[in-house]
Structures are given as C-alpha cells and as structure tokens.
Image: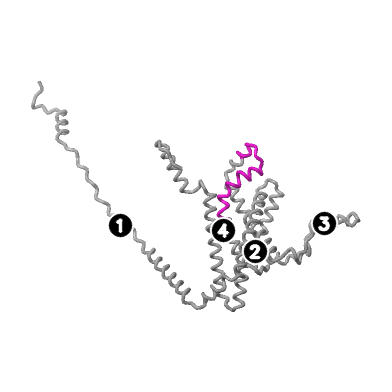
Amino acid sequence: MADPEDDSPADDTTSAGANTAPAERVRPEPIQAVPVRHPGRWVAVAVVVVLVAMFAHMLVTNPAFQWSFMLNHMFRSPIIEGVRTTLVMTVLAMIAGVLLGVVAAVLRLSPNPVLSAAAWVYIWFFRAVPRYVLLVLFGNLGILYARFEFGLPFDHQIGELLGVDFSARIFGLDANTFLTGFTAGLIGLALSEGAYMAEIVRAGIQSVDPGQGEAAQALGMSRTVTMRRIILPQAMRVVVPPTGNETTAMLKDTSLLVAVPVTNELFFQLAAVGSRTFQVFPMLVAACLWYLALSSVLMVAQYFLERYFGRGFGTQTRTRMRLLGLNASHGKGGAA
C-alpha cells in the first residue's frame, strides 16, 4: 500500500490540472474607424463649381453671343445642306480610307519586300503631309494634268521607239470636269485617312495570337482566307476604338474642305452667313454646337460597336464566367 503522505509527481500533475480553470478569452476593443479627410477634394470641387457658374453666367449675360440671331440662322436650308454634305463626305472618306488601310496594312505585313516597301512609302508620305496641304494640292491637280487618260502605259513612247503612230488610250476625262471640289476633297481625305488606318489595322493584326494563323494554315486555309475569316475578325476588337476616334476626327477635318474649296460644306456655309451679316462670332459658336452634336452621335455609335466587337473580353464577362464556373463546381447549373 502506498504511503498517504508520499507526494508523487503524478499526483501533483493531476491536482494542478484539476484545480486550473481555462483562461477566459478577452474580447478586443472595437476599432474606432476614422475616415480619411480629403480637404483638397472639397477645394477642387468648390473651384470647379465656381468656374462652371462663371461660364454659365457668361453664356447668359454676354450680348456678343447673340443667341436669338444664332438660333434663327443655324437651321436654315443652306446650313442643313452643309450638314448633309459634311456627313456624306465623312462616311465616304472613312469607307475609302478603311479599305485602303486594310489593303496597305496587309501589304505592309507581306513577306514580299517590294509590296511591303510600296505600302511603307504610301503610309510615310500621306502621314507626313498635313491634310490641309493635301487638299490644296488635290484642288489644284488640274495644273499638273489637263486630262486623265486610261489605257496602256507608255504607248506614245513605244510608238516613237517603233517609228509608228501608236495610241492605246481607252478613254479619258477632262481634269476640270472630273476634279470637282467634292471629288478632290474626297480623294485627299481618303488617301490621308488610308495611311492612318493602315497603322491601326496593322496593330490590330499583330495583336492576334500567331497561333491562330498557324492553326488555320494547318487546316489548309490559304493566307487570304486566314486573314479574312480568322485574323481580321479577331483584330476588330483592337481596331474599332481608334477607328471611332478617326471617324470623329474626319468629321471635324471636313471643315478643311474650304481649301479646295467645297462651298456647300457646313463650316463654309456658317462662315458665309457670319461674313454676310457681320456677325462672325455667333456663327462660329453655331459651328461649335453643330460639330458637338454630330460628334456626340458618332460617339454613341462607337460605344455600341465597341461593345459588340468586345464580347467575351470585358471585366463583367470574365467575372460572370468565374461565377458560372463556381456554380458548376458546387453542382449548380449556371443560367446563361
């Protein structure tokens, strides 16, 4: 029998374990969150509000604007005709510029050095020369050629070399008849826009994964079919936003057609009204309002085009796909 007065270590351990209570968990004090102060923001807001109020007060009280005169003249039939001419010129120049840009971009990326060099020279020249200078040049192109004739090149030189009277011209056009103000302005704007669009399209094509083209070639597609059906549709996501900016810029650059001149253009008509009535400044403000309205319509169209060609690439789409994958991993069906 063990001695009752014997204090063994085991008994001490058991007694200590029985007499020690678990420590009570102390709840932390609540955090006193103090919002960060931004006094600079409120100062900036106050400055902006004061500036907007001053600008609005100037618009209402300054008699130089002549709002009644402006509204009475900016919707007359010559001005509406100018708006129509501006829109038609913008659409036609952009269509021609986009087509030229696509061709020039494809040639620029061609493995053929002659085609690539020719495309580079075209892009270099028409990007380097200002549009105003180009419009003046094409407006006076009749000085360089009296007629534009189509047929076999160097036919007269070949005839002189052979000692015979030889002409292989199919048909010709008088330069003054063909190069009207509208036609000359359209050619100048389209050629200039084609050079800019070539760089935009080239950037879009190079943004596509090279594996896409390699996979298409492995399936037996030609280079032309691959470019038309695989590369260009994917490049549109990159091409559309800067193309929308170029369209807005083209709308504004139609005011440069005064250099050709094109007399039924919007800015020309507004400036003519201001010069005739000696109210130049109100008609300049009217021009600003017209271009603001037309550019706003183009920006809305650009927004919908970007959303259409950007399907599957946005942040919302990626978040939605992650949520659908999370639901699928938990055995839930994701509704489309």
Q: How far separated are the C-alphas under marks 3 and 2?
A: 32 Å
Image x and y of residue 167, in percent? 85, 56
Q: Going from the N terminus, do you reach mark 1 or mark 2 first?
A: 1
**Mark whose residue sits in front, 1 or 3:** 3
Residue type, numbered disc 1? Val
Residue type, numbered disc 4? Asn
**Mark whose residue sits in front, 1 or 2:** 2
Label 2 crowd (10 A; few <14 / some 14-19 / many >=20)? many
**Looking at the image, which residue is at 62% across and 61% down?**
90
- The residue that label 1 is drawn on is 34
Label 1 crowd (10 A; few <14 / some 14-19 / many >=20)? few
Residue type, numbered disc 3? Arg
Determine the secondary structure under disc 1: loop
Viewer-closest of 75 and 168: 75
**Mark whose residue sits in front, 2 or 4:** 4
Residue type, numbered disc 2? Arg
Q: Is residue 183 visible?
A: yes
Q: Quadrant of residue 177?
A: bottom right
- Looking at the rendered structure, the number of numbered marks drawn on it comes to 4
Q: How far separated are the C-alphas under marks 1 and 2?
A: 57 Å
- The residue that label 2 is drawn on is 131
Determine the secondary structure under disc 4: helix
Magenta run includes residue 223: yes
Viewer-closest of 221 and 74: 74
- The residue that label 4 is drawn on is 245
Tell me the magenta residue range: 214-242
